[in-house]
Image (cartoon, helix red, strand yellow):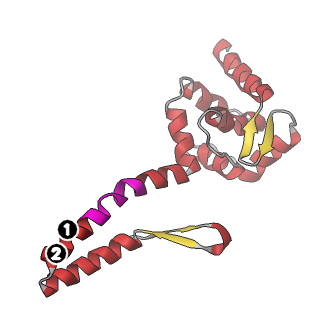
Amino acid sequence: MAFKAQQLKKGVFDIHGLEEFVERKVRDVMNALGLSGKAAPKAKKASAPKKPAKKSASASSSPLGALMAALESHSKKAALIKAGKQKDQLLRSLIPLYVARNAGVEVSSGVTSKFWSKFGVKYAAPNAAKALREHVGYARRTKNGNQITPNGVKYVESALSAKKAA
């Protein structure tokens, strides 16, 4: 049985899979004692609704997963990946923000780094943060993380149109 621990605020941990494990053990003990007729349906009802909620929580809790899903549904997916393989650090930092601008995903420099590693591009998180910090006006810091500005959108779209022309 695999458990997944997630750190919440103020040092509190949430361990996924623990409740299901305990319920299964209680059900096994009840079956061994011959009390399964009454306890088994309650355990099944309690664990059945939790499985879909667990899947949706893990998908929404992963910014990288949400970013990849947004990229899959994007009409310019191939062009964005190809443009990100250029040695333009600002463009590499802006493309994940460009993809996530309507998806409501919080994109940090770490997520940007992991995003590019999925496509075989080595791009360290400090480089992503530095590119956005040095090129003022293309992205802004908000309480929900970095957010692309209209100037950043123009920069990405001009890079995509330049790739089509070439």
Q: Are marks 1 and 2 in contact (CB under 8 Å)?
A: yes
42 horizontally vs 165: left or right: left
Quadrant of the rendered structure where residue 80 is? top right
- Residue 45 pos. (x, y %): 26, 63
Residue assigned mark 2: 38
Inspect this view and state whether residue 43 appears. yes
Residue in the image at 54% along x and 35% along y: 70
Question: What element does badge 2 sit on?
Answer: helix
Quadrant of the rendered structure where residue 44 is? bottom left
In the foreground, 150 or 159:
150
Q: In the rendered image of this protein, does residue 29 appear above or below residue 104? A: below
Residue 77: say if magenta.
Answer: no
Q: In the rendered image of this protein, does residue 7 appear above or below residue 68? A: below
The residue range painted magenta reads 45-54
| Dot 1 alpha-carbon crowd within 10 angstroms: few under 14, some 14 to 19, many 20 or more | few
**Disc 1 from disc 2: Cα separation:** 7 Å
Q: How many marks?
A: 2
Classify the position of the C terminus by image quarter: top right
Residue assigned mark 1: 41
Q: Report the residue that reaches farthest toward the front.
A: 38
- Residue 135 pos. (x, y %): 86, 37
Q: Which mark is residue 55?
A: none
Question: What element does badge 1 sit on?
Answer: helix
Question: For the residue marked with disc 2, what is the amino acid?
Answer: Lys
Q: Report the residue that reaches farthest toward the bottom.
A: 33
In the foreground, 19 or 70:
19
Q: In the rendered image of this protein, does residue 97 appear above or below residue 75? A: below
| Dot 2 alpha-carbon crowd within 10 angstroms: few under 14, some 14 to 19, many 20 or more | few
Question: For the residue marked with disc 1, what is the amino acid?
Answer: Pro
- Residue 35 pos. (x, y %): 15, 82
Residue in the image at 59% along x and 32% along y: 81
- Residue 92 pos. (x, y %): 70, 37
